[in-house]
Each structure stands twice: as C-alpha cells, then as structure tokens.
Amino acid sequence: MDLVTIAFYFFGALTIIFGAVVVFSKNIMYSAFSLLFTFFGIAGLYVLLNADFLAITQIMIYIGGILVLIIFGVMLTTRITGVDVKSGTMGKFQLATTGILTTVIAITLLIVFSSTKWYLKEVPAVESTVNDIGNKLLTNYLLAFEAASMLLLIAIVGAAFIARKK
Amino acid sequence: MLGTINFPILTWITFLPILGILIVLLVPNGKDEKGQELSKNIIRWVSLGITFLQLVLAFVIYFNFNPALTGVNDIKTFQFVEKLSWINAHLPMVGDIKIEYFLGLDGLSVPMILLTAIICFIAVFPSFGINKAVKGYFAMYLLLDLGMMGVFCALDFFLFYLFWELMLLPMYFLIGIWGGPRKEYAAIKFFIYTLVGSVFMLLVMIGLYHSTGSFNIIEMMNGHNFRPDSIFGGLNTTIRYTAFMGLFIGFAIKVPAFPFHTWLPDAHVEAPTPISVILAGVLLKMGAYGMMRIAFPIFPDAFGYFQTLIAWIGMISIVYGAFCALGQHKVGKRDFKKLIAYSSVSHMGLVLLGMASMRPEGMVGAIFQMFNHGIITAMLFMIVGVIYDRAHTRGLDDFGGLAKKMPVYTGIMAIAFFAAIGLPGMSGFISEVLVFLGAFQSYPVLTVISGLSIILGAAYMLWALQKIFFGAIPEKWQGPWDPTHTKYKTDDVNMLEKVALIPLAIIILFLGVYPNPILNLMTGSVNQFIELMRPFVYIGGSLVGM
Amino acid sequence: MEIGLTHYLFISAILFSLGLYGIITRKHAIMVLMGLELVLNAANINFIAFARFGGMNIEGHIAAIFVIILAAAEAAVALAIVLNIYQNFRHVNIDEVDNLKG
Amino acid sequence: MTQDVMLLSIILLLVPMLSFLINIFFGDKLGRLSGIVGTTILGIDLGLAIVVAFTKLVSHADLFIIQNKIEWFNIGSIKIVVGFGVDNIAAIMLVVVTLISFLVHLFSTVYMEGDRRFPKFFAYLGLFTFSMLGIVLANNFLIMYIFWELVGISSYLLIGFWYEKKSASDASKKAFITNRIGDLGFFIGIMILFMTYGSFMFEDVFAGISSGLMPFNSSTMLTLAGIGIFMGAMGKSAQWPLHVWLPDAMEGPTPVSALIHAATMVAAGVYLVAKVFAMFTADALTFIAIIGTITAFIPATIALTQTDFKKVLAYSTVSQLGFMIMSMGVGGYTNGFFHLVTHAWFKAGLFLASGSVIHAMHHAMHHMKDHHSDPQDINNMGGLKHTMPWTYRTFLVVTLALSGIPLTSGFLSKDGILAGTLAYANLTGGWHWIIPIMGFASAGMTAFYMFRLTIVAFHGEPKTEIAKHTHENKAQIVLPLVILTVLSFWFFYSPNPIDASKGWFHASVTQPQTAVPAAYQWDFLISEKAAPAASQHLSESSHGETGQIAEAGSHSTGHYLNKLQEETHHFHLLAMILSLLIAGTGIAFAFAIYQFKVISADNLEARFKALHNFSLQKWFFDELYKATVIAGILGISKALSWFDTYVVDGIVNASAYLTRGYGKFVGLFDNIVIDGAVNLTANTTGYLGSKIRKIQTGQVQSYVVFVLLGLLIILYFFI
Amino acid sequence: MMDTSHITADLIKSMGMFLPETTLIVTFLLTMIFDMVSKKSKQIAFYTAMVGLIITGIFLFQQTGLSYKGFANLLVIDSYGQFFKFIILISSILVIIFSYFSDELQSAHSKLGEYYTLIIGMTFGMFLLVGSSNLIMIYVSIEIMSISSYILAGYTKEVKRASEASLKYVIFGAVSSGIMIYGISILFGLTGSLNLFEINQFLSSNKVDTLPLLLGGLMILSGFGYKISAVPFHFWTPDVYEGAPITITAYLSVASKAAGFAVMMRYFKTAFYGPIIGSADAWNLLGNIDWHYVIAVLAVLTMTLGNLGALWQDNMKRMLAYSSIAHAGYLLMAVSVMNDNGVSAVLIYFFFYMLMNLGAFFVVQLISNKLKSENSEDYSGLGYRSPVLAVCLVVFLISLTGLPPTAGFIGKLYVFTAVLKSGYVWLAIVGVLNSVVSLYYYVKVIRNMYLRDVDSKESKLVYSPVTIAIVLMLAIPTLLFGMFFTPIVDWANYSAHIFLGN
C-alpha cells in the first residue's frame, strides 16, 4: 500500500464515519462538529484528486462560512440550556423504512457506479489548477460567474429581508 | 334560381342570436318595480322577435331549397354554401392547418334547421313565465339557439365541434339556475355526460384532420383524401373501428341511446319547461344528426362492422325506454316529465334502428322521426309545463279528472299523446311506419321485438292520460287554479299557451296526412347517402342479420 | 490495489445516501440543512473525481466551485427562512410545520 | 262511370269526418242541434252508400273491384302507393256501416239526451264512422292499417266516453291496448309483405304470391305473414285469446255498443280476413279456423251464466264472431261474410233493444230516486214484455234470428257456416271434426242463453219495483229497432227461406281464387279452372294518379267451383236438421228452466257449482292475464326501471365517486346499491380517493421520501 | 497559458445580445436603490420595475429572428427562447400589476421594495434559464429563480402559512436541486462535458451505458420536474401555492413553469437530438433511452394526480395549484411526443395558459380582497354580486377546462393534435378523460357562484374600473383566441425551432 492509498482510506473513512455521525447523532452540536470533520475528509480527498484549489475553497467556504452559519443558526433557533441540544427524529418505523430506502439508493448507485464505463482520459502532467480555473471562470464561464454574483446578491437581499425583525 | 340566394343566409340565421344577446344585455334594468317589469318585457319580446326572424329565415331557406341537389358527400350540390378561410396557420412540419368557415345545407340538415327554428321560437312562449334573472336567462337561451343552429349548418368539423361545445355551458346554466330542486345534480350530470362524449369526438376529429389534412367534413367522406400511411388511412383497421366507436358513443350520449341515457331523465325532470322543450326538441336530434353527418359516412367500413350492434342498441333503447316509462308506475315518485323523458329514449331508439337499417325507408323514417319527435315532445313538455305552472307538481298521482276542468287543454293534450303513440293521421305514425318498414328488411327479428313499443307506448301514454285527465278531480284542485284570477283568468289554457301549442298541433296533423313537404327535402340526400354507404354495409333481405 | 475512480464514487454514493437519510429523518430544520450539505458535497466529490480521471478536466472543478457558491447562498437563505419559522412557530421542528396539507 | 263511383266513395268517406269537425269545433254552440246535424249527415252518407253499393253490385257486377291509386309520397325509387276501392263486399259493408251508424245516431239523439258532452258524442260517432268506412274502402294494407288504428282510437274515445267512471276509462284503455297487440301482428305481417312484394296494394301482393315469390324464400314466412295479418283481425274481432276487451267495453254508452261492438268495428276483423283471403296458406287457414272455433265456443259457455244484460250480448257477439272466423278458416268465405252482414243487423238490433231497456230502467230509477240498483242486471227486470211491448217484439225477433230459427237471416247464414264446417271436416278428416262439433255445441248454447235472457228480462212478473215503472221509449229509439228487425228476415237475402245459396248475396259475394301456390294450399280450395297467368293486369295502370283499374283475371267475379263448395252443398241438409235440433233443444231448456221452472236453476247451479263458477267468472281469463301478461310486463318494467335508476345510473355514479368524497360516497351509495360487485368497486374507488389525499401529508420530509421512491420506481421500471 | 482572445471577442459580441438581461440587472439594482433612497414615495419600486420590464420587452422584441450561441456556448439566443421570455416577461408585468392591487401584500408591508426587486431577479433567472445550454448554467439559473421564489413565497413573513410555505419550498427545492446536481455530475462523468452541445456530440459519436445515462437523466429531470410540478416532484406545489401570496402563486404557476418547460425541452433536444433517421416526425434521441415513454408515464401520472387532487379542494388557490399540476401533465403529454409538433403545441398551450391562469388568479385575488376568503364555498351568489368578475372567472375556468370557444380549447387541441399525430392514442384518451374529470372541480366554482342562491341580499362588490379593465384584458383575449388563433399559432410555429448550434 502506497501512501496515496492509505491517505485515501483515511480521508474516505473520515468522511463517511463523520458523515454518519452527522446524520445519526442526536445532539445537534455533535452533528455540527462532525460535519466539520466530514468537510475536512472531503478536502483531503480533493487533494488526492489533484484539486488543490478546490480543497482550499472547501475548507474556507464550508468550514469558515457555511458551518459557522449553521452553528449560528442552531443557536438562534434553539433555546440552549446546555451543550446537548437534541434533535428529535422520526419514529422507529419511519427510521427503518427510510433506512431501507436510502440503502436501496446507495446500493443502486454503487451498482451503477461500479458497472459503468466512464469517460476516462489519460491524466496529463499534474500542475496546479488555480490558473486554469481562473482562466475558465473569467472566459468560458464568465456568464455563470456573473450570474452567480447576481445570485449571491439576491440571496443577500432576500435573506436579509426574511431574517430581519419587523 | 332555387337553392341559391345572394345573401349569406346561413350566417344570418346562425348569428342572429348574437344580435339578440347584445340587445338583451344592453337593456337597462329598471329602477323601480315598474321599470323592472318593463325591462323584463322588453327582453322577452326582443327574444321572441329574434327567434321569429330566425323562423322567417328558416322558411326562406325552406322555400329556396332545391331537393334535387343531394349534397351529403358531393360538395357541389350543397346549398346556401358559405365558405371562407378562417384559420390558416402554417406549420412547417405538419403542413398548413386550414379551418374553414364552411356552412351549407343539404337534405339531411334542412329539416333540422326548420325544426330548430320552430322549436326555438315556440319555446320562447313558455319562457315568458321565467321571472328570475330574466336577462341572463334570455342571453343564455339565445346562445343555446346559436349553438344549435350552428351545429346543423356547419360543414367543417372544427366549426361543428365549436358549436357543439358552445351549447354545453348555456345548457348548464339554464338547467342549473332556473331548474328544479335537484338542479345542481342534473346540470352537472348533463355537463359531464356530454363532455365525455365530446372529448372522444375531439380526438377523432384531430385524427381525421391528420389523415386528410383538412377539417372539411365532406372531404373526409371520400376515402381518397386519406393519406394511406395516416392514422385513419386504409379500411377496416382497428383504429378506424375505435375511432368510429368513439364518435358513436359521443353522439349516442346525446341521442341518448341505452346505456348512455341516464342523464336524460334527470335533466328533463329538473329543467324548466322551455328548456325541456329545447332539450327534447332539438338537442337530442343533434346526436343522431351527428351520426348521419359525421360518424357513418366518414367511417362507412366501421359502420358496416358495427351495424348490427347499432341496430341492437336501437332495439334495446326502444324497448327499454318504453319499459322504463311504464315502470314509472311503481318505482319512486311517478313523474310526468320522467315518463316523457323515457319515452324519448324509446322514440330516439327508433331513429337509431332506422339508421342502422341503411334502407331508404329506414333512413327517411329516421330523419322524419327526428323532426316529428322534436315537435311532439316539445308539445308534450309544454303541456306538462302548463299544469306544472298551475299546480306546482308533476306527480302523476296528484291529478285526475282534469278533462272536466280544462277541456281545450285536454283536446290539445290528446293530440300530442296520440301523436306520441304513433296514431295514424299524426306525423309520428308515418315516420314510425317508415322506420319499421326499413328496419324490418335488414333486421326482421330486432324490428319485431322493437314492435313491442307499439303496445307499450300505448300502455304508458294512455295510463298517464287516464291518471291526469280521467276519473275524479282531487279535492285540492276542485276550485279554480288561481282564486284571485290575477295570473290565470280561466282554468283552461290561456292565450299565450294556445299560441305556442296550437301551431305544433297543426304541424303534427298536417304532416300526418301530407308528409311530402318534409319528406321531399331529404329523399334525394338519403338515397345519395345510402349509395355512399352501400359498398360497406349490410342491406337486408334475409333473416340472417337478426 | 490502485485507487481508482470507483473508489471515490463509492464514497460519494454513500455520502449522498447518508445525506438523504439525514434530510428525511431529522426533525430539526438545521439538521436537515446539514444533510443537504452532505448531498451537495457528494456531488462535488463526483465532479472532482470525474475531472481527475477524465483527463484533468477543469470543468469539473468549475462545477464544484459553483456548487459550493450556491450551497452557501442556499444555506444563507434557508437559515433566514428557518429563523423566520422560529419567530412564527417558536420551534423549528419540520414535521410539526404541517398546517398546509391535503 | 267507375270514376263516379270512386268519387262518390271518397265523398262518402269524408262526410262523417265533416260531422266530426262540425261537432268538435262548434258542438258547444250547436248544443242539442249537434245530434240532429250528425244524424242528418249520416243520413246523407247512407244515401250515398246505397247509391255506391247499387252501382257496384248492379251496374259493375263484372268488375272485381273499382279502385284508384295515388302515390302518397315517395322515397326516391320507393313509392308509397295507396288508394281506395270498392269491391262487392266493400259495397255491402258500406251500406251496413252507414245504415247502422245512421240508426245509432238517431237512437242516440234521445238516448244521450242531457249528457254534458252531448256534441262530443256525436263528434266521436262521426270520427268512428269515418274510420270504419276507411277500412271498408281500403284497397291496400297501409290505408287499412291506418284506419284500423283510427278505429281503435275512436272506439277508445267512445268506450271511455264516461271517463269519470274509472271502470270506463279502464275499459277503454284495455280495449285499445288489447287491440294494439293484434295490431302489432298485423303490422309485422304488413312488413313481411311489403319487404317481399314492395307494395302495399292487395293486388300487387296477391300477384306476387301467385307468382311463387315467398318472403325469405319460405312458405312458412308467408303463413306467418298471414297469421300476422290475422292477428289484427283477432284484436278487432275479439278473437280468443284477445277477446277480453269486448265485454269490458260494455262500459261505454249502449248505442256505442250497438255500433262498435255488434256491427262494425268487431266485424272489421272478419272483413279484413275476407279482403285478404287470397293470401292465406293452408296452415294459416287452419290456424284461423281453430281460433274461430275456440272463440265460438268459450264465450258461449260464459254467456250461459252472465246476469248483466249487455254482458250476455257481448259474449254472444264474441261467440258469433268466432263463427264467422271459423267459417273463413274452413274456407267458407261467402257464408262467413254472410253471417257478418246478417249478424250486424240482428246484433245491432239486440244492442239497441238492450239500450232501450236500460234507458227505460234508468228513467224508472230516476223516477224512483234510486241510484244504487244496477239497471243492467237482468235479475232486476222481468215482465218488460208488457211495459215495453215494441222493444219486446223486436227483441224477440232478433233473438230468434241469432238463435238460427228458420225464416230469419240468422238461420240462413249460420246454417251455411255449419254446413261448411261439416264439409271441411269431411274433406280433411281426423281431428278436424272437432270444429263442427264445437260449432254445433256453440249454436245450441246460443239458443239457450238468448232465450234465457229473453225470458228472464221480459217474461214473468217484474222482479223489482223499477221494472214495474218502465215505459216504452220515444220513436227515435223504437224506429231503429223496427228497421233492424225487419232486416233480420230472410227475404232480403234469398227467396228461399232455408237456402241462401241461390240468392243475390251469394251471387255477389263469391270466394276469390286463392293466390297461394297449390303446394301450400288446401287442394279443395283450388278451383278446377285454377292458376291463371297471374299478373297481366298489374302493369296496366299502376302509374295512374287517380285512374281506376278494372280488372278481370283471377279476381273476376266469374263463377267457379271448388270441392268445398260442392261438399258444403252435400252437407247442407244434414247441417240444417242438426242445427234446428240443437237450437230447439237449447230453447226448450231455456223455457224449461226459466219460464216454466220445470228444472230448478238453483239446483243446477248447485250441482255444477264448479262449472257454473267457471263460466260466471269468464274462465278466469282476466285473472289469468293479470297474473301472467300484465304482471309480467309490469314486473319487467318495474325491474328495468329499478335497474335504470339504480344500476345503470349507479355505475355512472360509481365512476363519479372517483371524483367525490368518501363520506358522501358511503352515505349515498349504501342506500342505493345493494349489488355486491358494484359496492366493491365503489368502496375501492372511495378508498383510493381518500388515499390520494393522504399522500399530501403536509410534512415536507415525507414529500422527499415520495420523490425518492418515485425516482427509484421510475428507474427500475425503465431499466 | 490558454489563448483567450477569440473567447474575449465572443464575450464582447455576446454582450450585445444580452441587452434584455442586462436591462433586468440594471432594473434590479435601480429598483433596490430607488426603494432605499426614496423614503416617501411608496410605489417608486413599482414604477421602476414596470419601466424596466417594459424596456426589457423592447430589447427582447429587437432580438426577433436572432439565432445565436454566445458566452462560450453557455447561452443560446433563439426564437424559441424569445417566445418563452415573452411569456415570462408578460407574466412578470402582470404579476407586478396584480401586486399593486393586492391588499394582502400592500397591507403586510409599508413598502414592497424587496418584493419588486426579487421579482425582477427571478425574471432574470428565468431569462437565463430559458437560454442556458450548459448544465452549470442551468443549475445556476434554476438556483437564481429558486432562491428568489423561496423568499417571495414567504414574503408576507408574519403570516404563518406563508412562512411555512417558504420553508417547505426551500427544503424541497434544495433537495431537488441537490439531486439534480448529482445527476449532472453523473452525466459529466459519462460524457466528460457540461455543455449540452458537446454532450450531444459525444453521445452521437460514442456508445454510452444506458443505465447511468438513465439514472443521471432522471436525476436531472427531477430538477426540471419540480419546477414544472410534475409528479412525483409536485408535492410542494399545493402547500406552497396555498401558503404564498396569491400574486406569487400566480407567478409560480405560469412563469416558473414556463421556464421549467423551456429548459426541459431545450435540454432534451439539444443534448439528445441525433441526426434525422427516416421521417422527421420524431426526434431521433441518442443514448438508447425511450425518453418519450418516460415522459408519457410522468404526464399520465401528473395529470391524473393533479385532477384527482383538485377534486377535493375548497380553497381556490389550492384547487388552482392542483389544476396547474394537471396542466403540467397535459403539457408533458405534448413534450412526450418528442418532436417539433410537441414543442409548438407546448408553446401554443403556454401562451393561452398564461392568459387564463393569470386571469383566474387575479380574479381570485380581487375576490379575496373583498371577501377575505379564498374558499370557493364562500363564492355563493357571486355571480349576482359581481357580475363582470364572475363572468370573467367563468371564462377562465371554462378555458382551463378546455372547452371551446376559449383559448384553452385551442391549446388542448394542439396538444392532442401533437399526441395523435405521433400515434399515441392511449395517451390522448387518458388526456381527454382527465379533462372530463377536471370539468367537475372547475364547474364546482361556477356552481357556487351562480347556482347557489344567497340567502340574504348581500351588497354588490364594487371594483375600480382599472382592475375590471385588467381582468377584461385577460378575459377577452381568452375568448377571442378561442375563435381566431392564427397569429399565436404562427408565432409558436415560428418559434418552435430550438437552436442546435451552428
């Protein structure tokens, strides 16, 4: 086993295990912090996939932005009495059926993924992606980029409107 | 020259009601009681005037119609033709979509035009009694009139469908707003039933359009106009059979034929008198007319395939309707109108049977029966209306001995009743005989069974006659209908009712003795029609066909 | 064993299913949002993996970036709405917000 | 000349219509005058009829028929040709109808006096006469059928004239509907013939038959067509089993009974059989004979015990009609028709006499302020011989005629019929002997019950006070009686009082040659000079608008003999003796029981209680019909009506419930549909309906589940 | 270093084609700014938005006949897109007008600055969506309109049901778009591209596994499906439609649906359209998947469930929500035939659907302004209390049912024409039976208005002439187009050609 393999299994396990904790934990705070580790794992995987810029972005936006947002959200919407803020789940029956449903989905996806002939190409010499991404974003994807900025503007206007008290 | 007048008379006769509707809507509501009454009266008389003009136009058409020109599938021999390009949209993939404003008459439609004009005019008289939302009533009434006229004039399938559906809504309101206690139920039932029929018609219409590239009904009758690879191309294909059945069911619901008839008793019972008159007088005819104009000649092969089935349906309707009318006897409240409604099922079954025979006698009989049934049933419903207005009940058991109280009424009534049971000297007799004669040649056994209606018809009609007019007058009607004599000055029919009823009676008697004025109109067309159908259908002569 | 495309895809598939499970089963609105983030991240893993094995196709990275941007925007709006719900209902249990139904 | 006859006939036909129109529209203004108007018009009509009859019988004896043809309407190549015609039997019938109608009009002017709807009555009488004359003059099936129906409706109006009485309106309805049953058969026959021969004209149909063309290529169908036509006759002529309407029809005013139920309407059936005699196959004739025989016998047995004056006469009429039909069936055409005419006179006489009696009884009751007694019950009468001498005398004579006593017309005709049946039985043998046997038995019973009636009603002491107070009626009532009585003597028909076959009547009314090919006909009915080339005459003038056709050929009046006529001659004497014996016995019994009371009527009644009851209750025919036919029809209609309301409509509603709420569904549907299958579907749809709504739980997470599920299902569905 | 010069040229050129959208962005900003600056004028945002939209319309009109693939293949400008943009634009204008007359909105907030701003933003998103030819672009545009609509649905935020609607909408929408982006990633993995044209090229030159293509395709479809409320992605629709302000409900039911259909058809045709084989009656779809059948099944499910659901409803908004689901089913029917006839049928249908559906919602809004109720049971006697509105509502409902002589009938006519032309008789039969079912609930409203008599003589409802005029402006075309529809059909046919590159 080379280092890459070990790293893959490590980050993969990190992602999945903490991902599981996120959805199974009863304590919201636990979930929120497990989400942190999941994001870390994913960022690790990105690195393994030669996506250096993405890994950084992942950490910055997800961990620095979204996760903080979520934790604030938790605090604002929950009467905090202690550290363990519980989130209820459905009854056992619903849990079981949902479990079966998502398992079926997972298995379906796994079968499809393992049996498919994907679009594969030889990997050229690895270099940093930052340049390419920058170029693309401002040329080929300029419109999408601008649109995304509009989107963010709209989101800000909207979120501000909804969230503010009258 | 006969058959051509330089005047778009069909457009006028069809769209005159629009003028009426505009006037009716523009009449201001009166401020005080007197003003309101005046405004109501203006609306009533305007409607009467409009329908009268229509009647005049119908007679102009009648006298200018040349029966020698046969029409049916020959576009050149249609008369009073008006043809304009109406919708002309270009679809690059499909080709041009052409819908024409195409009106014209032949022997199959002229009797219907005449009937519609007569009935619409006559039914205004009982409408005078309507006092609730008069403006809306007459607007709807005229709209209905427009739709019916249009159906009989249209030679473009799209146009036909448009007019066909146009009648649904006014009818819904007319039953639903001005109807009896279960009006909501009856109105929605009528609506949904007819819509079920017409949506199938819509699909077939679209299919036909694709197959022939036009909505022209006449062109659809010619097999050469069907593209061979199109959906309805070829002959005797399953899809053609299906389409025929779709059309047939659509029209059979309107006729109404067993087992699609159950809307009729409800609609009749709940509808106000004039609407029952129109419903029975004209609307039911549209189903049979549609079969003749569209379903049969466009799908002659499918007609040939289903001919026996149609004859069976006709037979069952005849006998079943008669039995149900008689069965009123015991089940539920015995309602006068319901009895007539079921008798309509029976009588319209005759039309089906006659058409299924594909014999000239049968076809002519069927069309003539449509005309006669229109007149006779209209009369019957108005007769019901007369006593309903006075007694506010139609229960057969509530009456008795009216012959003594209302002798003139009884006389008129007797004419209508005897006409309904096919008594010679009345128009109904001739059409019945013709239908039976024609049908017997193709379907002897079925015709013999249908003959039971001769007996059953007499049984239920005479039974009703006895119930209402004979015997002793019940306690509560002993005195005058209206002791104050404000609404009804005499016990017998009043002038307005006489004006409405007597012309119908005269028509019935006149045509009973001398049917040529109507028969001559259609003979040529019917023969042409049968020539068109001949290669595909079974035309009797042995016992094989049942 | 060489770590190939499929390995990454498997992780993504499992993460995706986990996310869905979370969305469906959690009552707390914020938890649902967390599930949502898992789903989006699963998609991103796909994009990056495909990009890597599809010849370092930079489009995959671009897609992932947009997903991240949108996830952020969505999270912001969703949280705002959840806050509003909290003001109106004094709780954020999604399954109890069910006045509109039928 | 023939044109004049046709013109006169048409006028003659329309004149009573005039009476109808005048009386229906201006009756109220005319008041009592309307009776006089009606009578006068009928008098004119009678005159016309006599002229026509004489012209035909004397001046045009060589023509089989004087007729015209009109194209009524056409349907392209199919032309509906109709017309009127006078042949010998029509000529005679014209006189019969108009004369009796005239007499009844006259009679009614007094009899109906004071009725509220006096003018209406005369209007209806006019309408009836018009319709009846139409039947007589018809030379084709269509016109025949039209007037057939019109007769039906006018008799409906007349029988139900006193519609305030439920029994009257019931009776009129019954008469009409029973007639319609026959008419259906008639119409089916017409349809078969029209389909095969393409024409309604009698001559065309006969020519077609004799050319060997068969409906559906089967002689059976021709027989069926014949039986169909005969069913029309069965209805109108009250043949068993459609006879039930006639006794009930006595609810109508008595003049109506005389007009309709003695002489005209009921004779129409016999007349129809005579008109289309040429088309009956041997099988059809046998059927006719059997029906006739049964009809002669059963009502005779019923008449034995009836106590209602008019009912006795009614059953006697049915029985006599049976005789006529029986005669036709056995091939005794001339005698059958002869009996029709003679019977018309004396039965009309009987009815008018009974009317006279009832009128008198009514007056007496009125006088005594008695409103409860039954003026028609013979047990309330007695001794009328003295209070109403003229009525009695005329009644006695016509009774003798009906009983078949020599010197009366009835003797001549009945004797001929019985001889005919004997001859027939002899020629065919086997079970056919039953026909003469039952015929003779009926004749004996006729004599018995008629004299029973006479004796009980007229002889002896008055049984009630009412009878005592009766008086003879006015001349308008008596005069018709006298005229009809006179017409019941033999000399009008034949110089020989015991044999009519040499008289003018038999000379004029000769049996037409049958059109049916020999293979399907009794061989004894085929003339020796038989089978002329059929249709030469057909082409002659079929396109004439109003032209007349005078034709020779197979229908000419030339004499020819067939075996039956010879045989009848042989049996004439035997029949005469037998019938005299039997009639005498019947009369003797009547006298013994009711006049001299040698035999106790009560004793007999007690001894044959079952039989007596059976007869008194009219063989329970009404009950039988009520239990079978009527109950059956009502049952079917009830069932179908139920079916329609609940099942057909129920199915429609069931699919509508897909569209509506479950609660409503349960509430409405359980009441209505008992049917398990429909219930099941309905419940299922209702359940489904509520489930569809349940999916929308309001919980967004469940929506997600459904989305995922949906996606999975679609995915797996399309793999 | 990449050579970007030709791309730069393309971008600059594209900007010229981008005027309508640019105008929208400017309007968005101006509306926001004016609203913030002006403290006094309550309606300044309204007027700004209106002017901006009208200018957009003018620019849009100038693009007639243009066929262009710009922004490095991210966006396509063609007549097809233009048609939908017009529909979206007209609905936006109408909805803004409706909002002006909405008591519900005007009383909830003193100013509606953000409201108009967000509508403009949403319009912008839809404009982009209609022209998008890149999966990322599609995703971004969908998100723009989604996020705006999440907020708009909960705009009356103090109203409980509005906030609930908003929550449900955002969660459902986010899940759907999550599934969609996952699907996009699968498609990306299969073809190595996000651009629809490139995907098309790849698919036509390489053989691809069916199963992942189907999986990815379906997942992407769920993104479109939830925009057009197709079963089983429709669940949010009734709840959100009921909870949201009426104007927004109307807007969602028309504009956002139009955008969804536009992108769905473009996606299918652009990505999967192969070279013509045999007759041109059906698209020759690449990838070995019978998309026709998939969509047909969805169509049947959608209309049936929509109609059955609507039968139960008393709340007008909820009823119309289900009805809009049913209409999506009819439209899907036309999509399912997968040919240009179907496309043109959708276009025709949509134009008429816009008129009648917006009309119906506006009437409902006006009535609810006065009655403070959206319950159809409360409509009894309305036919007499407010004759003009009631008649117009009847026209709209009859048109929604699809009866002549209304525009709705013509729409249905063309849909069924397209379906039957391709020979899918069973589908057409299901369709017409569904429209029979739909009659029942539409007529129920009519029944309540006319057949139910009001016990007490309630006062007449008085409306300003302007509102009446607006209603009539929608009702009269609904009738007129039912009888003379050539221009719309011509326009739709002209527009029915989706730009396929080059």
Image: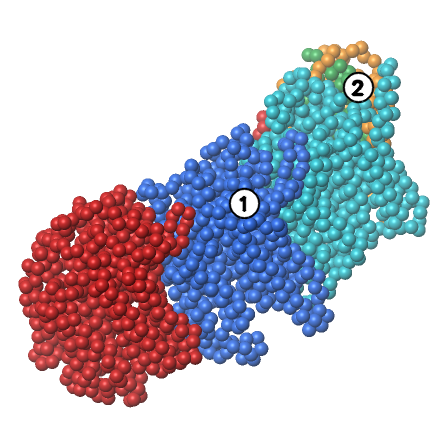
Residue at x 71%, y 61% (from the top left corner): B26
Give the residue type that dot 1 points to: Phe
- Circle 2 residue: C58
Image quadrant occupied by the C terminus of chain D: top right
The foreground one among D538 and B192 is D538
User: Whole-percent x and y of residue D246?
Assistant: 27, 67
Q: What is the drawing colour of chain E? A: cyan
Give the residue type that dot 2 points to: Ile
Mark 2 or mark 1, whichever is nearer to me: 1
Residue at x 63%, y 38% (from the top left corner): B98
The foreground one among A10 and B254 is B254
Q: Is residue D129 visible?
A: yes
Which SS class for mark 1? Answer: loop
User: Which label sits on residue B78?
Assistant: 1
Q: Are marks 2 and 1 in contact (CB under 8 Å)?
A: no
- Answer left or right for B516 relative to D199: right
Q: What is the drawing colour of chain B? A: blue
Chain drawn in green: C
Image quadrant occupied by the N terminus of chain D: bottom left
Q: Quadrant of residue E407?
A: top right
User: Whole-percent x and y of residue E162?
Assistant: 76, 47
Task: Please report, as a chain letter, where disc 2 is located.
Answer: C
Chain drawn in orange: A
User: Whole-percent x and y of residue B322?
Assistant: 40, 57
